[in-house]
Structure formats: structure tokens, C-alpha cells
Amino acid sequence: MKERLSYPFTAIVGQDEMKDALLLNTVNPSIGGVLIRGEKGTAKSTAVRALADLLPDRRVVKGCPCGCAWNAYDTACPDCKVRFDEGTATEDIVPMAVVELPLNSTEDRVAGTLDIERAITAGEKRFEPGILAKANGNILYVDEINLLDDHIVDLLLDAAAMGMNYIEREGVSYRHPSRFILIGTMNPEEGDLRPQLLDRFGLMVDIKGEQDPKKRSEIISRRLRFERNPESFVSEYADSNAELRETILSARDVVRDIVPDDRTLEMAVRLSLHLGVDGHRADLTLVKTACAHAAMDGRDTVTPEDVVAVSKLVLPHRMRKNPFQDSTLDIGGLENWMRDTLASL
């Protein structure tokens, strides 16, 4: 069967905030995922599927249903640890993939399940992997995430935060790594997520269709060219996609060594307090995202300006106090406040 080609990421017209949020999470997945809210037909799914082509291949344990990383014994699943100890594990190189979660998924299908009868009778933990196992090391994409049951969303967010999935049935427990880039998309006209769930997404963007006639025309032109001859269209953007991929790989190496100074930390704290954001998750996410922003810009130091630059992705969904309050930032006013604050740091 002929491989289906994805629309190139660098061919997407506009939607800069959405693209920035996705790229920043690829640089530092611990940011906590992206929630993309917007009307139908605004390239949400296209951008998510295109993202996988920008990410590097993975070194994994061959045959592991949980996708255990080759160089991560401490976080490996129990089966892989046995194979490592016995010297029977072998390495495999696989591309990153987009794993989609269907809306009707049950908890067992998401988390996986244990064969309780075999565990009791034979003393063996036989694990039937779920979507969280398949998502390990990949992109977990949840379309219409607002239509999922809250406890399923909680399960996804818990695994994303801990990097592990824990399954317990009748006193029998099993765990496996589940580190993934979580991307949820939704149409707010069909309902919203509870504020408690919104807060647990690292970044959020609201997107709309392009209003500029020239950009809209270019969107249609590119899409028609892609549908007419996918191979030729993808080839046209191969160089720009490769360049962006190299930028991501370099930023991933750089971001590990970036240590925010006191001025950057104080800016994050002051900004959260200034906008009345509750808790400390926003402060931490601001700093992590600011470091990724600096790394994507080719710098090995982060500044207070980076904090302000990413604030429009980190804070709006944490500011809303009730369903009728708008969750937007006055960027112009924020920049004025930033200048005054920088002078006092």
C-alpha cells in the first residue's frame, strides 16, 4: 500500500500561534501539551499530523508494545527490564507517529488492562497495552477532547504529567513509561473543558480562519496543489521542513542546559500575580516555555522578554474566572507593564 503523505508543516499559511505552541512542546515536552480551540476547517488536524515529520526517529526496544526507549532501563516496563537483565533485548529505530484517541474510548482501552486470571493462576503479569502504551514516545492526538468523559481526560493528563502509566486491578499492578506530546483540539461551540482540566494543559491557543483575502486564496491554492500532486508538493517544501527539523533538534540539545536567572524567574512570578493567576503551575510553565522559546531562537540564555513573549500561550486559559469572562490578553498593555517591570528588576 502506498504511504499517505502528510501536508508539510512549513506549507501551512498563518496560524502562527498554533505553530509556535506545537513547536515549543516538541522542544520541551514537559511543558505539558497543547490545547487548540477553534472553528472547523482551520488546519488544526493538518498541523498536528504534519508535526510528526519534523521529529527525530526513536531508539526503542524491538518488539516492546510499550515503546520503551533503548537507553532508559530505569523507566522501562517490567518485560523490557527482564530482557535487559538477560541480555536478550535488541535495538530498533522507528519514526515518531501520531497516535489518535477515539472519542468512544473506555478506560481499559486507554490505560490498558491486565489478565487477572493469568496473574492469579500462573503468577504472571500479562499486560494488554492500551493507547497510552502506543503513545509512548509519540504524539497523542485527541480531537474533540471536550467531548471525552472527564475521567478519561484526567487519565491522559496524569500520564502526561508523570511520564508513567499505572494499572491496578484486583491488587495486581503494572506500570510502563508513557511520555508523549499531548495535543488536544476542540470546537468551543460544542462545549468547553472544566477550568481544572484547562489549567493542566501547558499551552492553549484560540484560532480562527484567516480574514486576509490574499492569505485565504493562498491557503486554497496550496491545498489544491497538494491534492493534485502530493509528491511534488511535499518535495517543494522538503528543504524548509528539513531546516525547521534541524532547528528543533538543536533547540532540544540547547534547552537542557538553559538555567533561568533571577530576573527571568521574578518576571514569571510578577506576571502571574499581575494577571491574578492562581497556583504555581502557570509560573513553572512560563519559565519552561520561555526557555524553549530562547532555544528555538538559537540562544543559550533566557530573558524576561522570553517570558512575556510566551505569556499569550500560557496564561489566557488560566485567567478565566467564570464562563462569561473572556480569556484573552491585552498584549499592548502587557508590553507597557513589562517595560515598567523590567526597569524595577
Image (cartoon, rainbow, N blue to C red):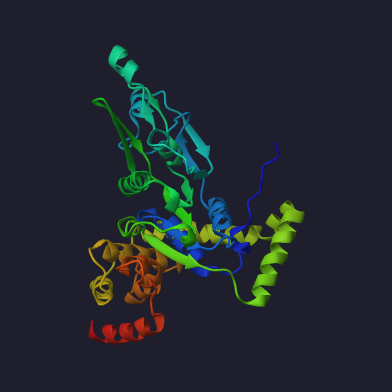
Where in the figure is residue 221, as x and y percent of width and height?
72, 66
Whether residue 224 sits left or right of residue 250 in the image: it is right
> Residue 85: horizontal and vertical position, in percent?
33, 25
Q: Residue at x 35, y 32 (%)?
A: 77
Of 292 and 314, which appears nearest the observer? 314
Q: Please indicate whether residue 266 sits to the left or right of residue 67 in the image.
A: left
Asked if 155 appears above or below 301 in the picture, the reply is above
In the picture, the quarter occupied by the C terminus is: bottom left
State left or right for residue 105 relative to residue 167: right
Q: Residue at x 36, y 84 (%)?
A: 333
Q: Is residue 54 visible?
A: yes
Q: Nearer the viewer, residue 53 or 221?
A: 221
Residue 23 visible in the shown view = no
Residue at the (23%, 72%) spot, across then down: 262
Residue 118, percent across and down?
34, 16
Could you tell me which quadrant the N terminus lies in? top right
Q: Position of residue 55 (x, y in %)?
A: 51, 51
